[in-house]
Image (cartoon, rainbow, N blue to C red):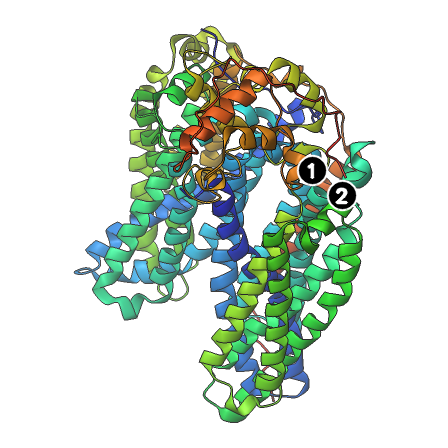
Amino acid sequence: MSPVIPAPVPIPLPAPAWLVHLLMVFTFILHLVLMNFLVGGSVILTVSSFLGRRDTRHRELVRRGARAMPPVVAFTITLGVAPLLFLQLLYGQFFYTSSVLMAWSWLAVVLMLMLAYYGIYWFSMQQEELGPRAFWVILLTTLILLQIMKTFVQNMSLMQQPQDFYARFLAGTVGNYLGPIDAVVFARLTHFFLAALALGGLGLAILARSWKAEVPELAVWARRYGLRWFQAGTGLEFLAGLWFLFSLPAETRSAFLGGDRLATSLVVVAVVLALLAMAAARRSLAASSVAIVGTVSLMAVIRHLVRIAYLRPYFDPRTLPVEGQWTVFVIFAVLLVAGLATAVWMLFQFFRPGARAPIS
Amino acid sequence: MLGGGLIIGIIAVLHVFVSHFAVGGGLFLPITERKAYRENNAPLLDYVKSHSKFFVLVVLVFGAVSGVGIWWSIGLVNPEATATLIHVFVWGWAIEWVFFIVEIAAAFIYYYGWDRLDAKTHLMVGWIYFASAWLSLFVINGILAFMLTPGRWTESPSFWTAFFNPSMLPSCIVRTAVSVALAGVYGLVTAATLRDIALRTEVVRYAAKWVLVGTLIIPLAGVWYISTLPTLAREISMGAAPAVTIFAGLSIFFSALVVTFTYFGPYQHPRYFNLTFAFLIAVLALSTTGVTEWVREAVRKPYIIYGYMYANTLRVGEMSRVRQQGVLRSARFVRIHEVDPQKPLESGQDVFRVQCASCHTVDGYNSIRFAVKGWSPEMIEYLLLHLNELKGFMPPFIGTDLERQALRDWLMSLNLQPTTREPTSPGVQAVTPPIPPGASKP
């Protein structure tokens, strides 16, 4: 039986599909980096909160590290909006169907997000008041974040399996499905989790640089400690990546193992960059960061190619009619540049040394 | 039990209550900060600082996440309409996203920057926050107004005809005024916690002025807004649908209470103002938001995008095809694709799921069992034939005769107190008067 998939909206695309693909991947990379800092950072803070009961260095790491978290949550959420918007534009009929099938668990993401966000604020603002209970707050927050990650992975996996839609629909009450739990989902989840640990560690190492002037010893230790997470996470990622690769359907997998020149070279370059990032970590944090962001970006591209490959038998967005809304697009592009410039200006003012004029 | 509409409603009302504060509060902060500098008023500046913490906790977390929540819930309850809004406005959404980024960056730098930035730069960051927050309101308002008054878009579809629709401007002014009023309401809440009596008196009266100025503009722009609405929408709010009329009346009643309480309370007697009083005003303001947003959503019925798509996601332009083809055959996620005489009730239930379930639940919110309680098959049949004429806020029933009869029989099976007559068998044909496409349009 051919899969049951809703028809795409009978309104032309406001831009050619390639541009939407491009923006989707670009904005997803931004979201992914921040999301990794958030999840990885929360795991590290949880561990340090626990160790901090006996170790003052961990206690101090938590005190300082926690302050950086609220903006990370805010930007993770906001930067996640754009890729989801473009995904709905190109592949709405798949995304909405999978979301409706697991409606309650998908809707719960909103509630969990709210809880996790307030959890992060509580943890970062009330360290002293919370005392030893702080550990439980951050532990619970981290578990909620991981559950959100799991739901996302499940929905994004389900939307790629339209052949299962109708059977799922018939199987039970629509909306009560908790999402697929199979080898691909587990492999994917492990892959994301390890990446988060690695980037969370790198984030800590970068953050520790700003502690140099005040607490030089702690800064040196925290950097080394963060890099240990980075290297362990990245190292294990090679195994998880292989597992993920072999959990993919045979045709998709073979594309990345020589079948498709572009796909294969992307994987090779991503792996080489990850190795370079590990090798450079102790000498140059900047070089290592650039390399690993390169890996993350290529991984995002690869993931997108996998999605296209999964869905191609059923739908190709290139077949949709296009009526470019170019004037509005140009306004968007100009505002994006102006908006980012404004944000950079504000950040520059914030980090510029200077004293506030007191009220006389 | 809950029904999609109710879930969206709960999230949306809370979001509206906070997101308008996100805009108005963004004006309240720099203006009050500037006032403190000009008057060289250090206690007032301390108040602004503490208010900014409250602001960040409410706006950045609850405001942002509940906004995501609306998107999540409309995508689940009404994917077709959501997808349509995304197709028509994708660059509008993208522009709004840029404003969100600037807004969030500015909010954090404003909040963390009290001790790091000089006064002038800090104020500037406050203004940047307000500008981007208001611009995000400007964009989303255009999209929301489009759903009720798509105007020329239905004839000449383009981003611009959709965005600059008839009710966009008055709606934008109403929302801006609401933002100013809500900034005052939240200001009253934080002002009521101040310990210094002189400062509390000053700030309470000051915040009350914000409420009064905002609520003064709302009715003026409101009249303009109402004048741009489709006739049917106006009629629904003024008597055609009693529930909607009651809510519209409540909206005016609650607004009047907010003004009266604010004027005679914090404005006239700021010294005696306390936190309980502040919460009372906040609850009244939330109630006003709730009923007003409910009315705004209700008057759009029977459509979700006026004149283009019905509340049950059927496009007006597709009516004749679906009527011919049948609703079960047109829908994809149904168990039965053609009325099955062996399974009349299941067929009817599937028709219900496709045509009615976006507004009705069986036993919960807007219960269909309750709606048909005590009805006879003839009454149900007659109602289904003339749905849009008898109940102006409902779309017409679209489907084949067999589908309508299957629906009728399923509805009868829900009837807790059936009349003495037996449900008519699904084989009996009734004559359907042809409904010309667009007949239900005002």
Sequence-first tag of 1 and 2:
1
The CA distance from mark 1 to mark 2 is 8 Å
- Up-down: is A171 above or below B124? above
Q: Is residue B29 visible?
A: no
Query: Residue B160 at what x, y percent from top left?
Result: 80, 40
Is residue B89 left or right of A146 when viewed as pictured?
A: right
**Location of mark 2 (residue):** B163
Inspect the image, locate mark 1, and give the three-letter code of the amino acid beneath it. Phe
Q: Are marks 1 and 2 in contact (CB under 8 Å)?
A: yes
> What residue does disc 1 label?
B89
Q: Residue B399 sits in which quadrant? A: top right
* Vertical order, B233 against B353 (above or below): below
Across and down, in percent, residue B341 comes to 45, 11
Q: Is residue B101 left or right of residue A62?
A: right
Residue at horizontal 23%, vertical 62%?
A: A133
Please check whether the numbered discs 1 and 2 fall on a single chain: yes
> Residue at 39% across / 17% down in the picture?
A167
Protein chain holding label 2: B
- Compared to residue B112, the image places residue A305 above or below, namely above
**Residue B215: x, y in percent?**
68, 71
Disc marking residue B317: none
- Secondary structure type for disc 2: helix
The residue lying toward the viewer, choosing from B407 and A38, is B407
- Viewer can see residue A288: yes
